[in-house]
Image (cartoon, rainbow, N blue to C red):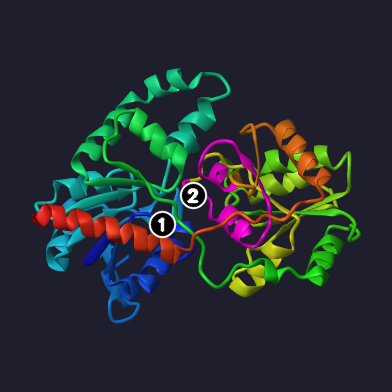
Amino acid sequence: MKLVDVSAFYTPHGGGVKTYVEQKMRLGPELGAEVVILAPGDRHEVIEHGPRARIVTIPSPRLPVDRNYWYFGDQAALHAALDDLKPDLVEVGSPWRSPSWVANWRGTVPRSLVMHADPMSAYAYRWLGPVLPRPAIDAVFAPFARHLRKLGATYDSVICANRELAERLAASGVVHTRFEPMGVEEGVFSPANRDPALRAALLAECGLPESAGLLLGVGRLAAEKRWPMVIEAVRLAARERPLGLVLLGAGGQERKIRKAIGTDPHIRLLEPVRDRDKFAAIAASADALVHGCEAETYCLAAAEARASGVPVLVPDRGGAADHAANGGGLTYRSADPRALAVAIGELAARDWPRSHAPVPTMRDHFAHLFAHYRELIAARQA
């Protein structure tokens, strides 16, 4: 099977899509798939990632709001690249313009839309939720819902990595939706990585003794992650018990988040840890992972925490919520710092119970996904 992933969200500068793409290129050939990532870039390039995996870039404009990203700007060039690559199946990872362009391509192979973004949760519900009920917000954004329904009718499969998104799209009339959870990098995250000395050092970084609770936050410093809300919740919970928060992240909201932290010595904002083994040790050494974003399509940070034996404190909506199931942690009312503070207190009262919830690996994910794709190809050929 030759899979071409039209990846508008891919950037070599990092992010969840880059992690997903690199795992796909590593595992795809082992699972019998040739993987080509077709992405926008400054120039045409072919970047080999082994004998059956590569990235092909098309000359494209940079995104004005974030110069680390590009966007497909030439439909004819995209179609020509697909003609040249001759895929057995085309996968698209953006719900915006690129899936419409791929739908217009004259090729006859199956097409799959993977929802690597949930714009309604990330923007519409977040911005308007405080003043409007969801049905009213849905009415305002009815054109986007029609766009997704059209894509669902055009594509052979619409893949969602979290249960709520799959159910919401299906309820709104998007056909061919399929819940297909992702997973963690195999062989990296484990409860065995827990290091009491590292935990003590992180608490000392927060000016606290080993007897305090250690919370970990991981993710981009972006508005939808709601880190100021998380910081407020930790402060509220810390009135009842000593708590430290170590936040690992970088992004455009850094100044705002540092302002929210202020002079609080028990909350530390640190650079992301790129070394996977070191990060796995940090993840396993925390008492809980705390997360604020209800717009996650999967929430890799929560999955990695669970795989490390660490319970999660996550919003009750979006991809993060799935990871609190089966003893994985607790959910709280989205965007409510007091509700999160209560959840922190409840978990601390249980003496930070370790999580034993099973976590799939990315190998599991791609094995299931590629089996589905082979069924689509066989049905189309028949």
Left or right relative to 37: residue 23: right
Label 1 near label 2: C-beta < 8 Å?
no
- First to last magenta residue range: 297-323
Above or below: residue 136 compared with residue 36: above
Q: Is residue 311 magenta?
A: yes
Q: Residues within 10 Å of mark 1 (few under 14, many from 20)?
A: many
Q: How many marks?
A: 2
Rate crowding at label 2 as few (under 14), some (14 to 19) or many (20 or more) other CA atoms within 10 Å. Answer: many
Cα distance, mark 2 to mark 1? 21 Å
Q: Is residue 286 magenta?
A: no
Q: Amino acid at mark 2?
A: Tyr
Name the image quarter holding residue 90: bottom left
Q: Is residue 214 above or below residue 157?
A: below
Residue 252: % across, % down = 58, 50
* Residue 10 in picture, x, y percent from top left: 39, 60
Q: Is residue 120 left or right of residue 223?
A: left
Quarter in which the C terminus is drawn: bottom left
Nearest to viewer (mark 2 / mark 1)? 2
Q: Secondary structure at mark 2?
A: loop
Q: Position of residue 351 (x, y in %)?
A: 82, 50
Q: Is residue 11 visible?
A: no
In the rendered image, the quadrant that contains the N terminus is bottom left
Residue ID for mark 2: 298
In which quarter of the view is residue 96 placed?
top left
The residue sitting at 80% across, 46% down in the picture is: 350
Nearest the camera: 162 or 87?
162
Residue 294: horizontal and vertical position, in percent? 55, 39
The residue to which callout 1 is attached is 69
At horizontal 64% and vertical 46% (from top left) the residue drawn is: 291
**Residue 66 is at least partly visible in this image:** yes
Q: Nearer the viewer, residue 121 or 181?
A: 181
